[in-house]
Image (tube, helix red, strand yellow):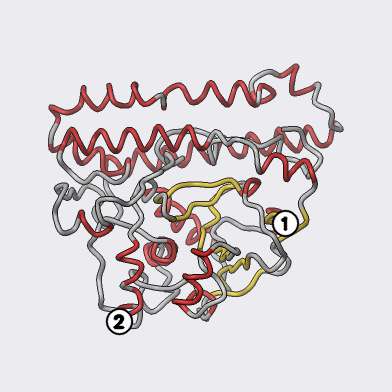
Amino acid sequence: MFLLNTDRLHVGDIILTSDKTLRSKGIRALTRGDFSHVMLYVADHSYIHSDGSGVHAGNTQRRLFGSAAGAVVLRLRDFDEATAERACAFARSEVGKQYSRMEAARSKSRREAPDQLEDSNRQFCSRLVAQAYAFAGTSLVSNPNYCYPSDFLDSPQLRTVETPLRHANSAEIEFARSESPLEMQTRATNFILSEVRKLSGMDIQTFEQLPGLLFKSPQHDRAVCEIVKASGYLELWKEDVRRNPWRYDVEQFASLPHSPSELVRAARLELLGAARQMEQFKMAHGQARRPVQRDPGRLFPVGSDQAQGAGADEDHDKWLSPSSLPTAANGERARPPWPTSGTS
């Protein structure tokens, strides 16, 4: 088994994947490409993508590949950190948005038409990544609203990163297959957005769209607060304390079975991660007060043509964006951030 080699990844890297599932085989056949899925690497061990569950984050330490050919990583030829960070900010702002098979299927006829716009309030994997970079001012494909995973391989703006995968050891495989706290965040996020849609009658797809709703309909403020409390989201931090007490107790941290140099490295990475999360929180707060996206406050009534872009029966399993509250980069920490010998 293989894992993404995060030592070789940069924020903003584009990850193309394939597997042996019927879904992956079907997408590759329809798009005539070698890959069926696209993800955006946004932070330490964290990526954001759109699949049948919607737009959400994942942990690279839980993404196993059956072979070294299971993934390709692409990077801007003229890498610019500000552009990559801006693309990642866009992806975070889309967290919670439902997946649309219908919109993905429309790529077949619309991907070569740059003027074909999207107005569905929905996402799919290649659209998410292409729109993220378009938002950051970099055009990677002919039409960022309708495109295939394979289109990124053909982009002259991107280059291939060598040896993006490495062998996973037995402890890493065991961890990857264990229960993830991201599932708790997914359920909480799903509950909040679903209940807010019921409450408001509006097609609220992301947390970024919530301020727009409350500015326009302040009478919902108290009810939305109660929904958030009932979701269990405000209690999720307790799970991280339970799983990773070393992050909160200096004595437990010092007693971890690692060398002093490894502990120093881990502490520095924790501080760097915390600073990055606070910057993301500040950015999200600024976006809520002064929208910078296409129109994050724009609201679609439930049942409208725009709201039905994905169909009413699409799954919407989502994760709360780190740009919304200063939580861990991907909702969990697999182990102290040192090489493969760490503890769970």
Kindly state the secondary structure of the residue where label 1 is placed: strand
Dot 2 or dot 1, earlier in sequence: 1
Q: Is 154 drawn above or below residue 144 in the view shown? A: below
In front of the other: 8 or 47 = 47
Q: Residue at coordinates 44% horizontally, 73% vertically from top-left?
A: 148
Q: Image quarter for residue 131?
A: bottom left
The mark found on residue 113 in the picture is 2
The percent position of residue 249, horizontal first and vertical second, equals 68, 18
Relative to 156, is 118 on the left or the right? left
Residue found at the far front of this picture: 22
Residue found at the far right of this picture: 259
Q: Is 219 drawn above or below residue 74 in the view shown? A: above
The mark found on residue 64 in the picture is none
What separation in Å lies between label 2 and label 1 (alpha carbons)? 38 Å
Q: Is 191 drawn above or below residue 339 in the view shown? A: above
Task: Give the amino acid type for the residue marked by disc 1 in the picture.
Answer: Phe
Q: Residue at coordinates 63% horizontally, 73% vertically from top-left?
A: 160
Kindly state the secondary structure of the residue where label 2 is placed: loop
Residue carrying label 1: 2
Q: Residues within 10 Å of mark 1 (few under 14, many from 20)?
A: many
Relative to 281, is 209 on the left or the right? left
Task: Give the amino acid type for the residue marked by disc 2 in the picture.
Answer: Ala
